[in-house]
Image (spheres, coloured by chain):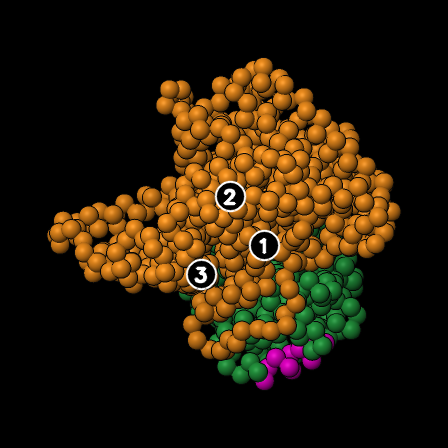
Chain colours: A orange, B green
Amino acid sequence: MSAFFYLISRSAKNRLAGLARGARSPRYLVAFAVGAVYIWAFLIRPVNRGAATPSLLGQPTEMIITLLAVLTLMGSWIFGSDATALAFTPAELSLLFPAPLSRRALIGYKLFRAQIAVLINSLIWVFVLRRGGSALPGPLRALSVWALFSTLNLHRLGAALVRTSWREHAGAGLRRHAWSTAAFVLIGLAVLAGVVQHRHELVPSFGAGAFFTALGRALASPPASWGLYPFHLVVAPTFTHSLPEWERAIGPALVVLALHAWWVLRTDAAFEDAAIEASAERARRVEAMKSRRTMGVVKPRTATSTIALASVGHPAIGIFWKNMLCLRRTAQLRLLIGPTTMAIIIGGAIAGDEGGVLGVVAAGALIFAAMLVVFGGRLIRNDLRQDMQHLPLLKTLPVAPGDLMVAEVASGALPMAALQLVLLLVAYAASFGSPFVPLKHETRLALLVAAPFAVLALNGALLTIQNGTAVLFPTWIRLGPAVNTGVEALGQNLLSSIANLFSLAIALIVPAIVAVGTVALLGPPRAITLALLVIVASGVLAAETYFALRLLGRAFARAEPLSGA
Amino acid sequence: MIQVRELAKLYGTFTAVRSLSFDVGVGEVLGLVGPNGAGKTTTLRCLAGIIAPSRGTVAVAGHDIQREPIEAKRALAFIPDEPHLFDYLSVEEHLRFIARLYGVADVDARIPVLLDELELIEKRRSLPGELSRGMRQKLAIACGLLHSPSVLILDEPLTGLDPAGIRRMRETISARAAAGAAVILSSHLLHLVEELCSKLLVVRRGECVAYGTIDEIIAGRPELAGRSLEDVFLALTAEAQPEAGPAAGPGARPPA
């Protein structure tokens, strides 16, 4: 364990030293200052207790967090764990796997290492919850969040290990993990039975509060509450409002955490030594795929079919073609399950009682399209955020850097825009069958006509921001095919998503001024002028984006691989 | 074909390459040799346009790599020791991608010939993750050769190749040079360098310690006459002989 501690502590120290060296350059220094101000303003700045909204820590939030935790963990069981659950870096694999270490020691190291991410994200959430109105002292909040994230992390690791056993030993693996498998199935059945049992209350409960109230009742009553009980125990301390309440809640949460640790470490006994070799073999394949920091969840599918590409023409089209194949072979539909579910739930709540089923479809499709603007860039990464790993190759290609930037950003922006347009068309079509539609038909049609311009401009701008970060600050961001999607990484993801949106808001200032000026010129917008307004504003944003891409092209031309001689 | 003048590359206060000047003409093969950390890869990366020189100029096929990068890069191929491949493109798709970037019109005719030459024809639909290390290196070589570059820059190109692959690569380098390509070959395999290269550039700590044909270099160090290239290399790069440099003989003098 001392060797593991040495490895982790020295790695962290050297990484911090590397970041500090990088911060000596003016570009990194400015970014560091902006980041520090952002973190201070968003997390640390003293809050007005009176103005804090206590609803963040209310019963509905606790219920939703519990449900989200269960759904995330179910995803780990059903679809396999995400990128981080069993992740070992190539260096760890080549040095630790052949070393005389037991599998238990390797799992222990993995748990130990995961604590870094857990602790960082716990800290972020401590500040977020403080702003949400928690009255608990900071250290107690931190302990609560740490227990929650650690348990979730352990559960995902345990699920990954059990699934590995299923895959490698088939029936024998199932028998070895009969208890954990049975527990997972029982929890799933209990939640499902609870929802089915209350379906008559849930289905007609469209309305902002009614649906969540009905869902809350369904989950709070048996049999769903039995299934959710262990998770409720873990989530509860984070949402307590007083010290006595917290003291009652933290004990059971720590017991659940300890049980998870025991379960994961005990899983070791169920594996033969050959499992290490199998893991190493998988790792070698992953290393071959050069997904340097992740464990092969985005392994490309076999190249059974391709997309035709003419051998002559603008070279940037070649970059776009390559990235389309990337998307086709690495896209993970399971990543869309969460946003789809949320869009349906929120759509149902927005549509209200009078909206009907088609109203839910329309609202859900609109919400989904909007969510793609916010989160799409995290799900679709077939652009420079992957290609920066191949910087030496890219720099030898005879493609103008500005053209390359446009092609890379278009690779993500166009597929996202296409998906959003389909969703908007669905929403438009469904709106005809819904008795409750807040906008007139002419307005809806005008917005639909303007939508292609708007979604292209918005996606292009947001992806330019994210690709620009990869070009300007490659050492500060995670390059590669996947991001950490674990629940314990929610804090980091939240911070970066809000930062991206903040940057977009700055980019929208000029389009907004142009739009306001146009309204002042033309008077209050009618349907056709509304469409024109959106198109003009989108054009301005697109022009800004194009200008930014050209500048980023210059930065890309100056970018150098990190390795030296 | 390749003109390098006063090339220098600094990383902060560390000088990786110090004032290198050399030429590689049509049909010539220049061997770039030196101990680990001598600045060979940095030099080659400057030549390929991957990194910008801190000082000096590099011209490829008459185009300055900094001022006219697209034209210069269109003429050259850089094959690194570690193949950079896209995980999600098959062998054939890699070649089609490269063909589009370099505007290779007759790609359909070239691909089977190249894949056959490099024994990849049966793997044309495989992804890099399904290839062995040597096959991935062969694919990187195929990508480099597809557009018939007039300048070939090879950084340890034989890493991971089997004996048959090494022989074939040797023949390929000779054939490309004979067809008029200017080749720079960096390798620690001195017998390969001796066999293929018409000129040598020996670097140590980023500095040129010898430049010219082997005969010219030995003429500048008569005590090395009759010794193997390995002995010559060790003598030239030995730390105990810092005076061994351009002044050592006429062959070590870089072009003006």
Q: Position of residue A245 (x, y in %)?
A: 58, 18
Secondary structure, mark 1, is helix
Kindly indicate whether the residues beneath marks 2 and 3 are on one polypeptide chain: yes
Numbered badge on residue A227: none
Mark 2 crowdedness (10 Å alpha carbons): few <14, some 14-19, many ≥20: some
- CA–CA distance in space, label 2 to label 3: 33 Å
Q: Nearer the viewer, mark 1 or mark 2?
A: 2
Q: Which residues are magenta?
A: B109-120
Q: At x 46% / y 78%, what residue is drawn?
A: A312
Q: Residue furthest top?
A: A244
Numbered badge on residue A419: 3
Kindly identify which residue carries mark 1: A334
Secondary structure, mark 2, is helix
Q: Kindly tell me whether residue A551 is visible in this rendering.
A: no
Mark 1 crowdedness (10 Å alpha carbons): few <14, some 14-19, many ≥20: few
Q: At x 25% / y 56%, what residue is drawn?
A: A440
Give the side of residue A558 with respect to residue A490, left or right: left
Return the chain for callout 1: A
Res A509 quadrant in image: top left
- CA–CA distance in space, label 1 to label 3: 16 Å
Give the side of residue A552 with respect to residue B175, left or right: left
Residue A461 in the image: above or below residue A158: below
Res A255 quadrant in image: top right
Q: At x 40% / y 24%, what residue is drawn?
A: A52
Of pointers 1 and 3, the one earlier in the residue sequence:
1
